[in-house]
Amino acid sequence: MFNQQDFLVFDDPTLDGRMDKIRAIIDPKFEAFADLALPILKEDGQDWYAHVAKHKMRKTNAPDNTWVAFAPNKRGYKMMPHFELGLWADNLYFYLAVEENMKPKDLAEIAPKLRAVASQVAQLPSEYCLSLNHMVNENQELASYANAVERYEKVKAAEVLVGLKIPAESSLMGQEKLTETLIQALQTLLPIYEKLR
């Protein structure tokens, strides 16, 4: 599915050029992954939808990353816990994401749920990691999860994303095992999602 050549889309410095490459090369791969992921997600009895990033608000700067998000809402995903598969110039990632756009009522309800899944997060495989911002290409160890949840409660723009990050130079790129690894990540994170929904 994904291979090392895909990351070259980020070599184009122009907005139009990079977006053309993302639409032609990356978005079809997101759609192909959605064909595999959506049937698994729909097993929980909800209708799930794939939201491929369109980057419509960009007028000058080319996007530093791109993604497809999966949520049980046809209109959007940012306002609820969701899954996100995306690319930066140096890695492919798959996260269970709780972002900053949740409604105040939902914000009050999600923090206790985030705390309640701490033991499940701690038991994730050692290669899993934590992100505090889906728009910043930085990660922390899962051991920082409690601090991330505390920050999420106190800081308006805070986020908590947990998942797998695969370097662009990984031997998995271009291999069938990569797709299996991503599906396994989805199945590994689903029990945590179920406690957050």
Image: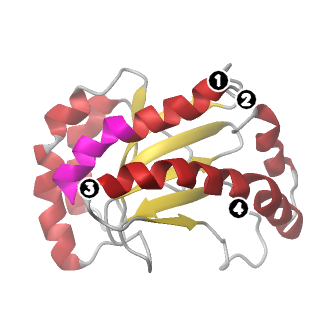
Determine which quarter of the picture holds residue 48. Answer: bottom left
Task: Measure the C-alpha gap from mark 4 to mark 2.
Answer: 23 Å
Task: Measure the C-alpha gap from mark 1 to mark 3.
Answer: 29 Å
Question: Is disc 2 in contact with disc 1, using a CB cutoff of under 8 Å?
Answer: yes
Assign a secondary structure to mark 1.
Answer: loop
Amino acid residing under circle 4: Pro
100 over 96 or under it: above or below:
below
Task: Measure the C-alpha gap from mark 3 to mark 4.
Answer: 33 Å
Amino acid residing under circle 1: Leu
Could you tell me residue 52's position as x and y percent? 60, 65
Disc 4 versus disc 2: nearer the observer:
2
* Residue 1 visible (yes or no): yes
Determine which quarter of the picture holds residue 166. Answer: top right
Does the magenta-highlighted stretch encompass residue 42?
no
Q: Is residue 160 left or right of residue 18?
A: left
Q: Earlier in the sequence, mark 2 or mark 3?
A: 3
**Residue drawn 88% across the image and 54% down it:** 12
Task: Measure the C-alpha gap from mark 2 to mark 3.
Answer: 30 Å
The residue carrying mark 4 is 63
Q: Earlier in the sequence, mark 1 or mark 3?
A: 3
Q: Earlier in the sequence, mark 1 or mark 4?
A: 4
**Magenta extent:** 187-197
Q: Which mark is residue 44?
A: 3
Q: Which mark is residue 172?
A: 1
The residue carrying mark 2 is 174
